[in-house]
Image (cartoon, rainbow, N blue to C red):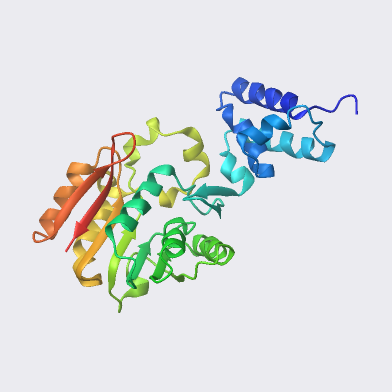
């Protein structure tokens, strides 16, 4: 017992290890609180408690992975999004706070009455499952070109009791004969010329196919603009996440392809262009 650490000692050592490795030291606290489902206050209340040996070993293994640059969410295999925990794997992006703002916009701008919704490029299913959980009357379909991502999304939908119809394929191919009131997407939008300014952990661990797009990161918006009129019902809405410097370019793409539509770009909590809505 003499060489076992208290939770406070383990936390301090973990923070020091991550700082020494050039990583965000707050991940040590995140690993501890997530392991127990604790709030920070609950962690503080346990500071003087001795950490069990098995947990100490697991914590050290997790710290080693984070120190090597792996995101803590991948280490734990889950990430919180819109108040719910989602399984994440190397096949899916880690859902981010900015995307929660996109979900909130959709919920605020759309009727709670029964409508048909499509999430294109669902990844972990974070958007589709959150929308279904918040609006049970909606019929939600989610697609992804990655069968591995769809499998993760299906698991999340089942775990969170949010029945979503999942299909596999590129863009609208799996729903070729269907139309929707709302279509949403968080597509790949990073230009490969931006690689040098990206976080190293994102480049090393997150799925490349979900990150990068051709034509300066605009390729998927160009594809959506060309096909939205076919898949949206009259009066339908399209919502998408965009890159922080893409607002003007994305607005022009949709206004040019759909001159009768109303195109709105919205900033995120940090004041950056982050979302677009196209109303037919």
In the picture shown, does residue 255 fall above or below 167? above
In the displayed structure image, the side of residue 201 where residue 52 appears, left or right: right
Residue at (32% x, 40% y) in the render? 268
Q: Which of 213 and 139 is in front in this view?
A: 139
In the displayed structure image, the side of residue 38 where residue 225 appears, left or right: left
Quadrant of image for the C terminus:
bottom left
Residue at (77% x, 27% y) in the render? 48
Instruction: Residue 81: give x, y in percent of width and height.
Output: 49, 49
Instruction: Residue 78: give x, y in percent of width and height.
Output: 58, 49
Instruction: Residue 134: give x, y in percent of width and height.
Output: 43, 61
In the picture shown, does residue 271 fall above or below 266? above
In the displayed structure image, the side of residue 56 where residue 97 appears, left or right: left
Instruction: Residue 207: give x, y in percent of width and height.
Output: 48, 49
Q: In which quarter of the image is residue 136?
A: bottom left
Q: In which quarter of the image is residue 30?
A: top right
In the displayed structure image, the side of residue 187 where residue 24 appears, left or right: right
Quadrant of image for the N terminus:
top right
Residue at (36% x, 47% y) in the render? 101
Residue 64 appears in view = no
In the picture shown, does residue 138 fall above or below 10? below
Residue 69 appears in view = yes
| Residue farthest toward the right in the current orientation of the protein | 1
| Residue farthest toward the left in the current orientation of the protein | 259
Residue at (82% x, 31% y) in the render? 50
Q: Nearer the viewer, residue 129 or 14?
A: 129
Q: Quadrant of residue 226?
A: bottom left
């Amino acid at each position: 017992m003499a060489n076992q650490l208290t939770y406070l000692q383990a936390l301090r050592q973990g923070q020091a290890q991550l700082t020494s490795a050039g990583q965000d030291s707050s991940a040590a606290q995140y690993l501890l609180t997530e392991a127990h489902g604790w709030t920070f206050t609950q962690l503080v209340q346990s500071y003087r408690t001795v950490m069990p040996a098995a947990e100490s070993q697991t914590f050290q293994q997790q710290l080693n992975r984070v120190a090597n640059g792996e995101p803590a969410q991948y280490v734990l295999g889950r990430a919180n999004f819109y108040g719910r925990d989602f399984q994440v794997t190397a096949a899916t992006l880690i859902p981010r706070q900015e995307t929660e703002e996109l979900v909130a916009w959709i919920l605020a701008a759309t009727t709670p009455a029964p409508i048909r919704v499509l999430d294109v490029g669902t990844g972990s299913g974070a958007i589709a499952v959150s929308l279904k959980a918040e609006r049970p009357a909606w019929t939600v379909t989610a697609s992804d070109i990655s069968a591995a991502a769809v499998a993760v999304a299906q698991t999340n939908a089942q775990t969170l009791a949010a029945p979503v119809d999942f299909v596999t394929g590129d863009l609208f191919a799996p729903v070729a004969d269907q139309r929707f009131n709302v279509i949403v997407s968080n597509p790949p939008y990073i230009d490969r010329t931006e690689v040098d300014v990206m976080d190293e952990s994102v480049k090393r661990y997150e799925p490349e196919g979900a990150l990068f797009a051709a034509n300066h990161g605009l390729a998927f918006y160009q594809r959506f603009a060309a096909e939205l009129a076919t898949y949206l019902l009259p009066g339908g809405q399209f919502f998408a996440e965009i890159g922080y410097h893409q607002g003007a370019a994305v607005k022009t793409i949709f206004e040019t392809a759909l001159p009768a539509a109303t195109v709105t770009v919205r900033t995120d909590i940090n004041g950056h262009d982050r979302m677009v809505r196209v109303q037919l």
